[in-house]
Image (cartoon, coloured by chain):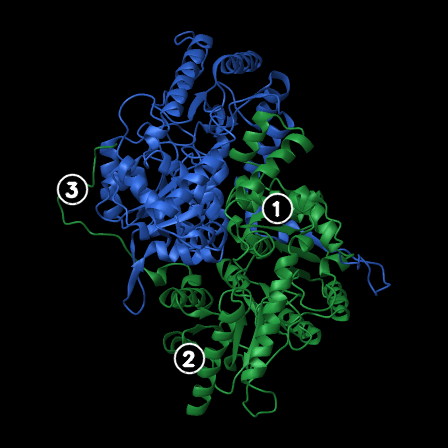
Chain colours: A green, B blue
Amino acid sequence: MVTARRTTTDTRPAVPASLNLADLHASLTDPALGSMTFLNEIAQRFPDAISFAPGRPYEGFFETALVHQYLYRYERHLREERGLDEDQVRRTFYQYGRTKGIVHELIARHLAVDEGIVADPEALVVTVGCQEAMFLVLRALRADARDVLLAVSPTYVGITGAARLVDMPVLEVRGGRHGVDTAHLEEVVRDARARGLRPRACYLIPDFANPSGVSIDVPTRHTLLDLAERLDLLLVEDNPYGYFTADGEPLPTLKSLDTRDRVVYLGSFAKTGLPGARVGYVLADQRVTAADGTTGLLADELSKLKSMLTVNTSPIAQAVIAGKLLTHDCALREANAREIALYRDNLNRLLAGLSRHFPPGSGSGVTWNVPHGGFFAVVTVPFPADDALLEVSAREYGVLWTPMRHFGTGPGTEYQLRLSFSLVTGALMDEGLRRLAALIRSTAASE
Amino acid sequence: MVTARRTTTDTRPAVPASLNLADLHASLTDPALGSMTFLNEIAQRFPDAISFAPGRPYEGFFETALVHQYLYRYERHLREERGLDEDQVRRTFYQYGRTKGIVHELIARHLAVDEGIVADPEALVVTVGCQEAMFLVLRALRADARDVLLAVSPTYVGITGAARLVDMPVLEVRGGRHGVDTAHLEEVVRDARARGLRPRACYLIPDFANPSGVSIDVPTRHTLLDLAERLDLLLVEDNPYGYFTADGEPLPTLKSLDTRDRVVYLGSFAKTGLPGARVGYVLADQRVTAADGTTGLLADELSKLKSMLTVNTSPIAQAVIAGKLLTHDCALREANAREIALYRDNLNRLLAGLSRHFPPGSGSGVTWNVPHGGFFAVVTVPFPADDALLEVSAREYGVLWTPMRHFGTGPGTEYQLRLSFSLVTGALMDEGLRRLAALIRSTAASE
């Protein structure tokens, strides 16, 4: 133990460092980052409230032994299938590793099996959750103040936050019933260009979007790909919820339809693997041409950025996810059969509960959309569903949800709330809906 | 499995997306990021060369069972010492977690035991390695184009890279024999201010710096703290190597001497814990005042940024490090007794080898510094030690090292090479030095 303590040879009164928030990066006073803080805070202040707020996976299937099983499975893979010796196995787990990750080949197999995507493993970067992937893509694309991102509004707060971190404005594209209004997308791009801006990409969650729950239909997916080519735009496809279909067949991802390298595909194992591993990835197979004419993969540019951001994703965390992939022959749709059924039941229970409390045609003024899967549904109420109401809801009714206003500024969002149906099941969901209905009825009556 | 494949309704010839490197973020064409790529590449091309290049910890003590033992130890801590029930344990390991991390109290205990630093656990942010901590601090401090960072040159390439990611210029401060030239530091700050710039912080590795191996003596540490107050500057103290003392007592960290909240302390478990966990942290106990007069901790601002960068550090990875801390009662100096002895032996072997090949007074023109610990020593040769020579060294002599030019532009750096003595031991080190000496003698003879 070092014996020197907080002493100084200086006898003048100490002046502690003091920083002004106004002198720190602008993102820190941005509503997007404030939203997250507010929402986390209210959840912490009311830990006993029934929560339809967070987009977290169901916890009932977590087993303490899983992490060990998955680590052993990957270890066996390294020895028996990859032929690594004892020292190489240890080095793989414990030493600094490849910046782009070590489980890229397994992820490529998974994409082939589950998505019909033929991915070059070298075009994959394994990231610290999907959030790091978003940051890397935006950091690469935001070269100067002209560069802007497009996103369907309301949108995932994580992409807005990542854009704030690189000072990249986000232009809102209308979503609507088809998930994206392609005519409006084109208009926003042309208008931005007329103002001297450079729209670089459009961020989308085509399957069961967060926060809207809406999916983009197949014809609109094709229209998007054509539009991306015509407008010379990238599409950033985020797919955390696509596996959780409640009815109907899974839709093809944009990436699986992409013959023109227009789609940068973001993947997450937070919902299909284990959130605590914090492993995601980006498939970026676009060609990048340097000034000297040489070309490389966008993934390799993202890897350079990653080397200065997190160096590499923990190989131990990657090994956990690899173990799960190997245990299920890289077929995550099959591996999540229990989860898919559970979320389907939850969605049905939620929709049935809403219908029971607010029978259609009863004049309650309460409506909701009917997603075909995923984690989220949106309820529209006849009064502002704002932070003040959420505070009342948490304190007096013991139920949490998310004001849609945190996800976008579009018309109508102030009357909407997002309900997540991933975490709360059975009787607890029924009780949560009873509380929510009481809040809604009482607020509507007092308007 | 989704049946749709890469098909499109569009029959026009497909035009694949093509990006120009010049349209991507400027960091991607910056020499700092190019350095890392070049150095990684050459290491990969010559895997059988004896390498004095990477600053990686010794691998001989890695044991496959360790990760399981550490995870079990932390699990026991959660149950027995923290009183968590089964569900809470599983949630801690597997679910999304606290943005600032879950092992902050153990890290605070470690800082008290090993460093005499009294740290508020709430002022700690657990990060994805120390690299993420650097990025967070620089992202917070870089508000606009006037903000600049100071760093002792030559400096760690990771801080230069993180600064490039936020477009923050790095002004070089001379190091010299005391590790930092405080008069020059003051001059650089005053000169920058005269040019309308805002020097926000000075980055330092006070103990066994990377790449120089030099430590800052105690009087200079006090001078630095006084200067930081007088110039209203933060000191960013990075301490990855402080535990590896080869002779003499450990020196007090700047943070342990800091009575005026001037020091932001960066910690890493890559060398004292396990690199593969990718767990580091930042202690940021500075007060930040908002426009409305409310104050908070800098750590909480960093946490907001982290929520949009990586969400949280993998709790599984944190659990591995927590298990190691718990196994050793949070005393990492004791836990690393074997490593400390090994690196001491390595350093002595390196210095003895250099003396044998280039006896002082023999007129070889080859000199080197004598660090008192850490991972690195610097050799000065009578000819440029550049990338071209490294290529020759790798191909013809089978030995790798790092041209100092990658770490700074100061006078003399072009004749210096960094030798890392952490990874290569015993007879292999002797053979590596024999090869290096052959390269040096042959190059000197042909000059």
Q: Are discs 2 and 1 both within one chain?
A: yes
Q: Secondary structure at mark 1?
A: helix
Q: What is the distance, in whole Å, between disc 3 and disc 1 at their CAs? A: 58 Å
Q: Secondary structure at mark 3?
A: loop
Whichever of callouts 2 and 3 sits on the residue coming sooner in the sequence is 3
Q: Which quarter of the figure has residue A148? A: bottom right
Answer above or below: position of A12 versus A43: above
Q: Which residue is mark 1?
A: A324
Protein chain holding label 1 = A
Q: Which residue is mark 3?
A: A10
Protein chain holding label 3 = A
Q: Nearer the viewer, residue A346 or B21?
A: A346
User: How dense is the environment of label 2, judged by Cα within 10 Å: few (below 14), some, or many (20 and up)?
Assistant: some
Amino acid at circle 2 = Leu
User: How dense is the environment of label 3, judged by Cα within 10 Å: few (below 14), some, or many (20 and up)?
Assistant: few
Answer above or below: position of B194 versus A172: above
Image x and y of residue A281, in percent: 61, 50
